[in-house]
Image (cartoon, helix red, strand yellow):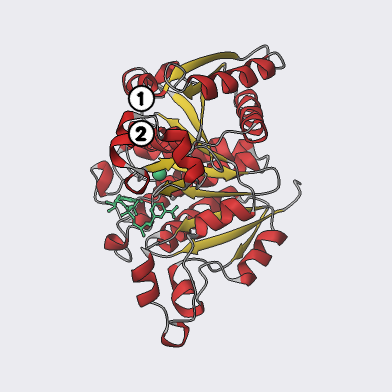
Amino acid sequence: MTEKKSIAVLPGDGIGPEVVHAALEAIDALHLPLDLRFGDIGWECWREEGDPVPERTWKLLEETDACLLGAITSKPLREAEAELAEPLRGTGRRFVSPVVQLRQRLGLYANVRPVSDLENGAFDFAVIRENTEGLYAGLDFHGLDDALWNAVRHHPNAAASGPDATSVTLRLQTRFGMDRLLRFGFEYARAHGHRLLTLVDKPNVLRNSSNFLRERLELMAGEYPEIETEVLNVDAVALWMVRRPERFGVLVAENMFGDILSDLGAGVMGGLGLAPSGNIGDHGAYFEPVHGSAPGMAGQGRANPMAMLLTIGQLLDHLGMPLPAGQLREAVRTVVRARSTVTYDLGGSATTAQAAAAVADALRPAGSPQEVSA
Ligand code: NAI
Ligand code: MG
């Protein structure tokens, strides 16, 4: 018997709870050695407690092996303050996105989004996005001090605008940050049998930083002789991801390029109702569907649970349970391919619970009485 793994389950808000519960019910059929421990996160925690990630939730995360997240609503600062419970207003509390808090506090530097063709098996690749530095490092300035102004003043557009009418964002790339990302990318490729690692960057424009990154890649590549590497421009990758998705294995990209490409990947896969993701560090990880809380359809039982089911598959892989993970993916593929019990976004009329139940039926051994009739 495999050792039991503990999972912090944080359903969150919006459609989060309904897809989490439907998906967890569906995987009952797998009889997995999991200890599920439920916790609170999200908008209601913010409104009632002034903190979207309460201290008890951090404790739960410390005590568990990994985390499964539903979805979380985030709103701009002014709305967030206005929705706080009366006694908490004006107490100086500031809403910080829970997913940003999780990534920073747990050091989750790799955002992994597997993209596969569920219907025909024509492609299967993963976008791995750097989560902590790059253009989103937070070094973003409007109205420049002397140091920044001196760096840009000779650009003709800056000279025509002056320091108060110029903004600058720095793309931070460090050996520390890049090496651990590349290492993660190679290890992921090896573990998942991918033969090609594509470094997505912009070497013909961002010459110095791209060259530095390429050197780091080349240094490491020797340790993984079975994996071919290439460096491609981000715009070309966007085109090819749509035109020839089957050519890719693992794509590794800095924060902003990866942000954009991973949403493109969700589109290539067939939409938000299908796309899973994981945020992984050396000492922790959480897994969530790419979609958000979709407040407009919350509570209606219309949300597609497949993204959440595939997210659980990714979590099981991470916890060293590739067999049930594969069975789960195959069951999702069976249901998506049959198209008879799918939600509205895939052209069907099934509810969240019905679509998840169809996956549960596909997971049961053939011939068992509850199998779906197509
Ligand atoms: P969203 O992903 O929640 O929804 C966009 C649209 O996609 C929905 O209106 C719906 O038509 C469709 N959709 C999403 N999930 C679906 C599903 N499972 N099945 C079928 N259709 C689905 O993005 P939106 O509307 O921009 O954001 C809503 C809230 O979610 C915001 O507060 C945002 O901050 C938050 N959000 C949270 C994320 C997270 O928890 N990591 C990620 C993205 C957004
Ligand atoms: Mg995004």
Q: Position of residue 347 (x, y in %)?
A: 23, 43
Q: CA distance from mark 1 to mark 2?
A: 8 Å
Element on which disc 2 rests: helix
Residue beneath disc 1: 238
Mark 1 vs 2: CB contact within 8 A: yes
Q: Position of residue 354 (x, y in %)?
A: 35, 54
Image position of 330 with respect to 358: above or below: above
Q: Position of residue 123 (x, y in %)?
A: 42, 23
Label 1 environment density (alpha carbons within 10 Å; few <14, some 14–19, many ≥20): some
Label 2 environment density (alpha carbons within 10 Å; few <14, some 14–19, many ≥20): some
Image position of 217 with respect to 149: above or below: above
Image position of 111 with respect to 9: above or below: above
Please indicate, yes or no, whether residue 293 appears anywhere in the rendered image.
yes
Of the pair 235 and 154, the residue shown nearer to us: 154
Ligand 2 within 8 Å, label 2 CB: no
Q: Amino acid at mark 2?
A: Leu
Residue beneath disc 2: 264
Quarter assignment of residue 131: top right
Q: Amino acid at mark 1?
A: Ala
Please indicate, yes or no, whether residue 374 appears anywhere in the rendered image.
no
Q: Position of residue 370 (x, y in %)?
A: 43, 50
Of the pair 64 and 132, the residue shown nearer to us: 132
Which residue lies at the image location 62% right of the left edge and 33% below the top edge?
174
